[in-house]
Amino acid sequence: MIELVLNRRIYDNDIGPLMRSFFPKERLLIFADGVLLGRESTDEKRQREEEAVTASMKVFVPEEEGDVTISLHVDGKEDASLVIPYQQEITASDFTPVQLKKASFDENWKAMALRSAKKNAVKRGAYDLLVKVTGKELPWGAQTGIRPTKKSLELMEQGEKADFITGFMKQNYRTTDEKIRQTLKITALEHQVLSKIEGATEEERAGDPSLNLQGKGYSLYLGVLFCPSICLYCSFSSHAIGAYRHMVPAYVASLEKEIDFAAEHFAGRRLDSIYFGGGTPTALGPVELDEVLTYIERKLDLSHLKEFTVEAGRPDSITLDKLKVLKAHGVGRISVNPQTMNQKTLDLIGRHHSVEDIRVAYALARQVGFDCINMDLILGLPGESPQDMQHSLDEVVAMDPENLTVHSLALKTSARLNLEWDKYQDYTYTNSDEIMEASYLAAEKLGMHPYYLYRQKNMAGNMENVGFAKPGKEGLYNILIMEEREDILAIGAGAACKKVRIDPVTGDTQITRCENVKDIRTYIDRIDEMIERKRQLFADVIR
């Protein structure tokens, strides 16, 4: 058990994830002004009263301008502490040249930048103390955000060179040399891919505030929260298709109502990519898939479309008829996702198919003519050894897909693996730099390079998720959404829209969102409300 003690509620979302990363198997308690944040069960309260605290970090942040003090105590080691002076002015070590220029003429932005600089200084200080006392460093340093490449891409597009970006990441985030090299390679490729679709200059965005970084570009996400079964690690509100089959016609009708909204109000925008995800879209039957895809073709302008992905995903949902439907409607990129090629793990995590089913589904996709197939693997699944994970990598290499996405297991709060932790606490959850390096070597054997990267909270080994691709086979949608380049119009239960705008004064990316409800029955019953949420979010687009 570890604890973070704050004199008031500030920086808890910044320092808390850092402490979890250094002590991944410990329960984190956060106190602000003497009050425990969050709820706890009777058993958790008993645990708190009976167990000793492994590590305690105390942070004092004055209400007004003044020094921040941080102290850390870990069992068996002496207390360590530091003082972070209040920053009176912006310095080059904290900000980029573009940001410094903005701060010189805009007082509001300067005040905001000072607050950000102070927060980053506190976060770095907490990280440095944790390193000093534990003797352990994290690959991504003090970075806890899910998009560690976003800043690098932004700096690259501002004309900054690799040396500047490297120094900036080391100074501000304590990122390791290897992760910085990895970031630079990925952002250079992202920049190359994005240059192939139309963007918008600063002058154009100033003349039309509804433009994003890709001008009038947007992507369409369709979510289908049906699955053959619910995986142990899944945190999505997926619904087992066997129990909800009777609701599929009404669900498809609701999707079509949302497509009608897109057709009416996004007619003046450029549709760059479509991503049909889930859940498992191919949990739908071939007739239902054909109906949805036909409706998209009939209602939307696909003349500028550069990518159409369907996340077929589960091998036990893939049939020859469904693959033929996808191919006939111009789908160019699909996923066949094993997650692991070890049968014992497939059985444990609730994927009701065999390793051979994965090979068969992949072969069917090739038979139909798909030449851009993605395969997902998850490193750190319960009970898997490094040898098990290497076996999965070797099996995928033998199949030779065009894309490979390697995920580090993230234990989400709502996943059954977390909710029923007592059943699985004796299993090991292994991931490391060596295992991630093995995934890079496997991708290299396939002639792939990393092209996008993101992180999640509570990831095994404090690693990351990496997408690899053969040259020219990079997933455009993955880059657009991960680097927050353009609007995402998302339809379906649980789907989240994202509006991307650029602040005309600061040049910062402003993100606003709206979400559809996750329960399928509620989504169908309240479909008009879901559409109204989109109408309000994209009011600047709707004419």
Image: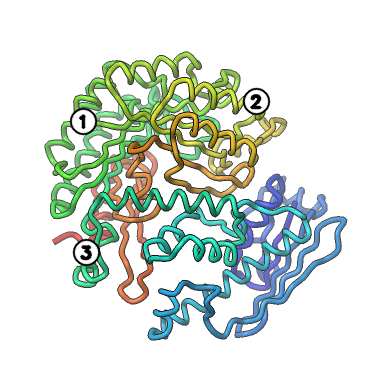
Q: Position of residue 363 (x, y in %)?
A: 37, 16
Within 10 Å of disc 3 (Cα), the crowding (few <14, some 14-19, many 20+) is: few
Q: Quadrant of the C terminus?
A: bottom left
SS class, disc 2: helix
Identify the element where label 1 is drawn: loop
Which residue in the structure is indicated by mark 1? 330
Mark 3 or 1, nearer chain start: 1
Residues at circles 2 and 3 in contact by the CB criterion of under 8 Å: no
Instruction: Look at the image and name its color scheme.
Output: rainbow
Question: What is the secondary structure assignment of the residue under circle 3?
Answer: loop
Q: Is residue 446 above or below residue 109?
A: above
Position of 64 with respect to 376 (left or right) is right
Task: Give how far across and how far down residue 72 sits, in percent.
Answer: 77, 64
Q: Nearer the viewer, residue 298 or 228?
A: 298
Q: Earlier in the sequence, mark 2 or mark 3?
A: 2
Residue that appears at 22% across and 62% down = 539
The tag earlier along the polypeptide, 1 or 2, is 1
Q: Which mark is residue 187?
A: none
- Rounded to the nearest angstrom, the CA distance separating label 3 from label 1 is 31 Å
Q: Position of residue 473 (x, y in %)?
A: 34, 36
- In the image, taking residue 367 as reference, residue 7 lies left or right, namely right
- Give the numbered dot on residue 540: 3
Instruction: Report the amino acid beneath label 2.
Output: Gln
> Which quadrant would residue 14 be assigned to in this image?
bottom right
Q: Determine which residue is flagged by label 2.
A: 387
Whole-angstrom CA distance, mark 1 to mark 2, is: 39 Å
Residue at (36% x, 37% y) in the render: 471
